[in-house]
Every structure is written in C-alpha cells, then in structure tokens.
Image (cartoon, helix red, strand yellow):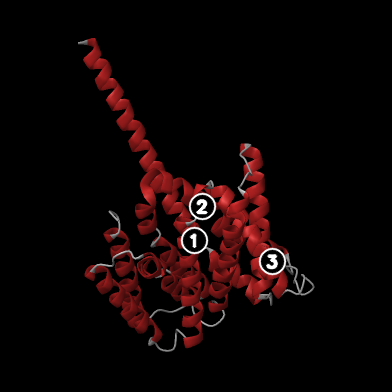
Amino acid sequence: MPRSINGQDSNCTNHLMSSTNKSLGYLCAIIAAITYGFNPLFGLPLYARGMSTPSVLFYRFFFASLMLIGVKLYKKSSFRMEARQLPPLLAGGILLALSATFLFLSFRVMDAGIAATILFVYPIMVALIMAIGFHERISFFTWGCMIVALAGIALLNASDGKVSLLGLVYVLLSALTYAIYMVLVKESNLKRLPSDTLTLYAMLAGLPVFIIQLKGCTLLQMPSDGVAWLCVFGLALFPALFSFLLMAVAIKRIGATSTAIIGALEPCTALVIGICVFNEHLTLRSIIGIVMILVAVSLVVLSRKKS
C-alpha cells in the first residue's frame, strides 16, 4: 500500500512538473513571438531620423551579439564549436543578415504590419525546399494551403496600393532567405550546437554583410539622440536577444510545431503596433488577406506535426 501511494505521489509530481514545463514553454513562445513583432516599433523611428538600413541592422546584430556573449558568460556556458561547423555557420550568418536586410528594406516601401504578415509564409517555403531538395512529400492539403496563402498575398497586393510590388519582392526574399537558413540548420551539423551558441555565431557571421555595405563602417551613422539610442538597444534586446532565447526555451518544452503556431502572434503584434503607433490603415481586403495567410500557414505547420 505505501508503495502504491508513493507511486501515485511520484506520478502526480511528474505530471505537475510536466504541466509546469509546458506552461512555461507556452509563455516563452508567446513572449518570443510578441517581442519579434517589435521590429517596426524600434526600427521605424530610426528610419525617421535618417538612419540607413545597413546602419540600423549593424547596431541590431552588434549589440545583440554583445548581449548574448554577456548571457553566455553569466551562465558560464561553452562557446565551443567544431571546425567543420564553420562553413555552414558562415552561410547561415549571411542568410540571416540578408533576411533582416530585405525585411527592413520592405519597411521603407510598405506598411510594416503587412510586411510582417507576408513574412509569415516562410514555413510554407521551408516545406517547398524540403520537398524539392530533400524529397519530402507534400500533401494535397498542404498544396491547398499554399494556394490560399498566395491568394491572401494577392489580396494584400491589391489593397489600395498598400503593398508595392518592390515591397512584396523584398518580403518574399526575406522569407526565402530565412527559410533556407532554417533548412540549413535542420539538415547540417549546426543542429548539434546549443541555440544560444548558434544564434551568437550566426549573428557575428552576419555582421560583415553590413560592414561591407557600410564600406568598412565609414558610412555608419550614429544615433542622433537619446530616443534613437533607446531604439537601437530595444531593437537588439527585444526582437533579437529576447525573441531568439525564449524561442529556444519554448521549442525544448512544447516542441517546434506549437512554437511555430504561436509565432502567428509576430505579424499580429506588428500590425497592432503599425496601427496604434504609426497610424497605418487596413482595408477590409487587407484584413481578409492577412487572415488567409495566417490560417493557411498555421494549418501547414499543424499538418506537418507528425512528419
């Protein structure tokens, strides 16, 4: 009898711990998604002060890297990586830098909230890349969702000039480069690196992209005032450091599928910020297009849960 009671107590404790871990995972996923949606909140005021895209992103990658180094030193975690991981890390860093560049370029020619929504098609691009490059099967259901997502993008593109063709190209290139980065991590030896180590080295590898654009930092623009400096640090802290680290925690506790679904909050956050802070406007056609994209991508992620 005592053994049975002890066994029940053990099961209850394990269940409670599992429930707590999942609750923490969902909370981290929600915060990660919301903070990533802060890109326009901190990026657009820097644009308004005349800063160039390479300057803004240089500061974002540079200060986020410093913060990550500080976190790793505080945790006393290892910086070790294998020599054979260097080539894919360099490629991954370039892809991350290009993805950020295209996204922030899109902010200059279209509403940031709509840009963030279109960016959310990257899971569909991952599915396509895996199908074409690694012979993963795509179901008719997934094909249908892709068509719905493309129709949603078409509606956005036709929404009273809110989405320029150039802006659409920028966002799709941002989604594509990020999708390639995700496949690279999944299919290479980078998946053995801890998430914080991978993120740190990828951002450091991406920094030269901006240094080259800035001609060895000779064209680097300094933030003009205290608000600009706050935006620079906010850009590095929230959409970079917080989002990446909390996303890693969430994936470990609730899995990549659930984390990706909750990621739908990213464009929703950007939309709310765009409307409330930057007076961006949505038409009914835009709203329908946004809903089509979010639903289609979420269904694709759900359908791949068992793959």
Give me the disc on residue 184. Answer: 1
Depth check, front residue: 94 or 302: 94
Residue pictured at 63% horizontal, 37% vertical: 76
Secondary element at image label 2: helix
Q: How many marks?
A: 3
Q: Tell me if label 2 and label 3 are in contact, CB under 8 Å.
A: no
Q: Which mark is residue 146?
A: none
Point out which mark residue 208 bears: 3
Q: Which residue is mark 2?
A: 189
Residue 221 appears left or right of 13? right
Q: Considering the numbered disc 3 on the image, is that residue within a helix, a strand or a loop?
A: helix
The crowd level at tag 2 (other Cα within 10 Å; few <14, some 14-19, many 20+) is: some
Labels 1 & 3 near each other (Cβ < 8 A): no
Mark 1 vs mark 3, CA separation in Å: 20 Å
Residue lying farthest to the left in this orientation:
1
Nearest the eye: 167 or 88: 88
- Whether residue 233 is visible here, answered yes or no, is no
Residue 256 appears in the picture as rendered: yes
